[in-house]
Image (cartoon, rainbow, N blue to C red):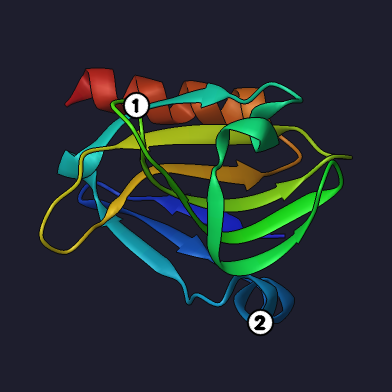
Amino acid sequence: MAQIELTQTHMLIKLTRGEKIFGLHGDFKIPAALIRGAEVADKDVWKTFGLRLPGTSIPTLLAYGSYLRFGKTGGWTFALWRSNQPAITLTLATSATQRYKRLVISTDNAQALADEINDALVAC
């Protein structure tokens, strides 16, 4: 399971070896200025991902990798989502170094982590 660490200047998301292989991506280091908020994802969040480019997916069970959704509400999403665990949705601002608008990551303590991230944003 991915480990999420918060510091004063950035958020570091460390992926396991399996997550790196199936998600076709490495660890994330996201500047704090690009984080807009966090919330607990609903069970049907996988329906909002869009087209998988690239990654691994078993519909209704797991989704790892990059997803592109077209339209006004579209953009890039990176997912490490499993149906048997709660997930957190991180909303991000895009930049020259960060293309993802959203990260969806399964974690055991989704509500506590979302509260911690939102509290850190308010404290800035």
Where 56 falls versus 59 (above or below)? below
The residue that mark 1 highlights is: 73
102 or 33, nearer to the observer: 102
Between 35 and 24, the one lying in front of the other is: 24
Q: Is residue 13 left or right of residue 33?
A: right
Q: Residue type at mark 2?
A: Ile
Camera-side residue: 108 or 64? 64
- In the picture, the quarter occupied by the C terminus is top left
Q: Position of residue 46 (x, y in %)?
A: 68, 37
Residue at the left extreme?
Answer: 96
Residue 14 is left or right of residue 96, and the answer is: right
Residue at coordinates 59% horizontally, 58% vertically from top-left?
3
> What is the secondary structure assignment of the residue under circle 1?
loop
Circle count: 2
* Quarter of the image with the N terminus in it: bottom right
Q: Indicate the quadrant where residue 90 lies.
A: top left
What residue is drawn where x is 70% and y is 43%?
107
Task: Classify residue 65 as left or right of residue 8.
Answer: right
Q: Which residue is mark 2?
A: 21
Residue 13, placed above or below residue 102? below
Question: Between residues 67 and 25, which one lies in front from this camera angle?
Answer: 67
Q: Which element type, helix, strand or loop, lies under badge 2?
A: helix
Image position, residue 64 (x, y; %)? 66, 60
Mark before the other along the chain sequence, 1 or 2: 2
